[in-house]
Image (tube, rainbow, N blue to C red):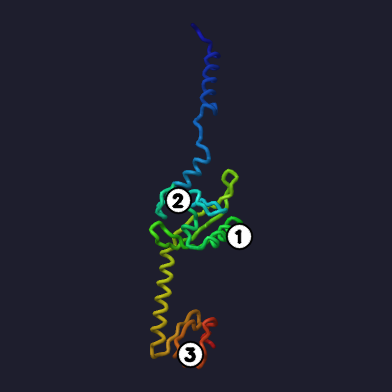
């Protein structure tokens, strides 16, 4: 049977239109899927907290690994069980975060092993199905704090050695005496003022 070319063309056009119809195209995953992936797969430690009572709504995989709890256990805990501050202090800090008065905090957090770690927390409010929550990202800064303590201790020992040296010693920076031992200041005949470095021209 002979089919006119115009009829064949119309049939092919309808087929192509049907193939390109949005209802036949692969459906994109909902945005919540992407947000869930970003939350769960992110290497940063993340917690979602109820600001009313401090209950941990959820922690991502990185949080579970860091604190040493499985997801179900973490979701039954309260943030004051992790934060070493008192319950009242934790409530005050959560209020500051939720009202956007403050978004960067330094806390001590307790792991499941009992170990205390120094952490820096970025926290702010979010809305989930109309419910106000806090979204927190936690960074472990314990190595940095330990390095600062070691540096201060090193400086303390260095100053002790200099003070006991039987000689006049000073440190000059930008043409100012920023440090001198007691013999140096006795030689100058002045009383040292740590808040007012002396100029070399003085």
- Looking at the image, residue 105 lies above or below residue 1: below
At mark 1, the secondary structure is loop
The residue where tag 3 is placed is 185
Marks 3, 1: nearer the viewer: 1
Q: Residue furthest top?
A: 1
Residue depicted at 42% across the width and 77% down the height? 155
Q: CA distance from mark 2 to mark 1?
A: 27 Å
Give the quarter of the image for residue 184.
bottom left
- The residue carrying mark 1 is 101
For marks 3 and 1, give the CA distance: 46 Å
Mark 3 → mark 2, Cα distance in angstroms: 59 Å
Tell me if residue 160 comes above or below residue 59 in the rendering. below
Foreground residue among 44 and 199: 44
Please name the residue shown 38% across and 58% down the image: 113
| Residue 53 percent location from the top left of the image | 55, 54
Q: Which residue is mark 2?
A: 74
Nearer-N-terminus badge (3/2): 2
Tell me the residue at 38%/88% (across/down). Answer: 165
């Amino acid at each position: 049977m002979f089919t006119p070319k115009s009829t064949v063309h119309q049939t092919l056009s309808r087929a192509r239109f049907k193939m390109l119809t949005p209802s036949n195209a692969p459906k994109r995953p909902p945005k919540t899927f992407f947000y869930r992936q970003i939350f769960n797969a992110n290497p940063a430690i993340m917690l979602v907290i109820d600001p009313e009572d401090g209950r941990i709504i959820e922690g991502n995989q990185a949080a579970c690994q860091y604190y040493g709890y499985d997801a179900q256990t973490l979701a039954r805990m309260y943030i004051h069980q992790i934060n070493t501050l008192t319950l009242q202090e934790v409530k005050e800090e959560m209020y500051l975060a939720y009202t956007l008065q403050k978004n960067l905090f330094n806390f001590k957090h307790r792991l499941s092993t009992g170990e205390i770690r120094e952490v820096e927390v970025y926290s702010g409010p979010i809305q989930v199905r109309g419910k106000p929550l806090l979204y927190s990202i936690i960074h472990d800064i314990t190595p940095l704090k330990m390095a600062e303590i070691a540096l201060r201790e090193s400086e303390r020992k260095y100053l002790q050695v200099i003070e006991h040296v039987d000689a006049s010693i000073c440190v000059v920076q930008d043409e100012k005496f920023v440090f001198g031992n007691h013999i140096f200041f006795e030689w100058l005949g002045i009383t040292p003022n740590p808040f007012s470095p002396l100029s070399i021209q003085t």
